[in-house]
Image: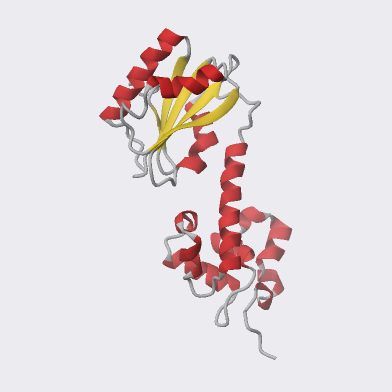
Amino acid sequence: MQKDHATIKDLPEEEQPRERLARHGASVLSNSELLALLLGSGSKKENAISLAHRILIKEQGLRFLVDSTMEQLCSINGIGEAKAAQIKAAIELGKRLAAFELGVDKPVKCPQDVAGLLMEEMRYLKKEHMKLVLLNVKCNLISVEEISVGSLNASIVHPREVFNPAIRKSSASIIMVHNHPSGDPAPSSEDVSITARIAEAGKLIGIELVDHVIIGDGKYISMKERGLF
């Protein structure tokens, strides 16, 4: 009886991703092999690894998996709703793990800490999101608050919108973070003027603006380190 789908088990045992992962760890697996393990099976014409490789080559790699909708995934030959859901669930879990890694009990003392906290969540966003990292007197994370969505301007990022959650949660200091959907974190003139405005307001209120970090695609810029406020 002919199989409907070629599976990973059709490969020689030593070539099966699951066996290689068990023996050597997940880090030795290629992107195609990791995706194949999520898929489990391929189609009538190809096994899971071939299907995974075709998706990553044709659809511009891992970035496509992050950006794609369920409908886009289901439009690929060999991907149904169940496999599409598994892929999207794995991507979301990866984002949450990346954000959780820093943890609320660890201090946020430098731009690298901020990038570690928010890079994976913000690097793929299609619109500009302004978030606020609230810190206590020991620079430990209190919370991350979303302030605005959309192109930043002075009317959207008003000091009262920024300092409201900071005052409410008794923050000692704050860090502004926003993303550039273009992937280029270079600050605009609007970014510079908004940052200066918030920094001045913070001095009056007694809540220091420690930094304004701009997130790009795998890159970030600290406006404090650049001497822009």
Pinpoint residue 87: horizontal percent, then vertical percent: 57, 60
Pinpoint residue 102: horizontal percent, then vertical percent: 61, 33
Q: Quadrant of the N terminus?
A: bottom right
Q: Is residue 191 left or right of residue 162?
A: left
Relative to residue 210, is residue 66 depicted above or below?
below
The residue lying at 60 percent from left, 16 percent from top is: 138
- The total of numbered circles placed on residues is 0
In depth, the one of 9 and 108 nearer the eye is 108
Relative to residue 222, is residue 45 depicted above or below?
below
Q: Quadrant of residue 222?
A: top left
Q: Is residue 144 left or right of residue 12?
A: left
Relative to residue 215, is residue 81 depicted above or below?
below
Q: Quadrant of residue 157?
A: top left
User: From this viewpoint, is residue 100 visible?
Assistant: yes
User: From this viewpoint, is residue 229 visible?
Assistant: no
Relative to residue 16, is residue 177 depicted above or below?
above
In depth, the one of 215 and 146 nearer the eye is 146
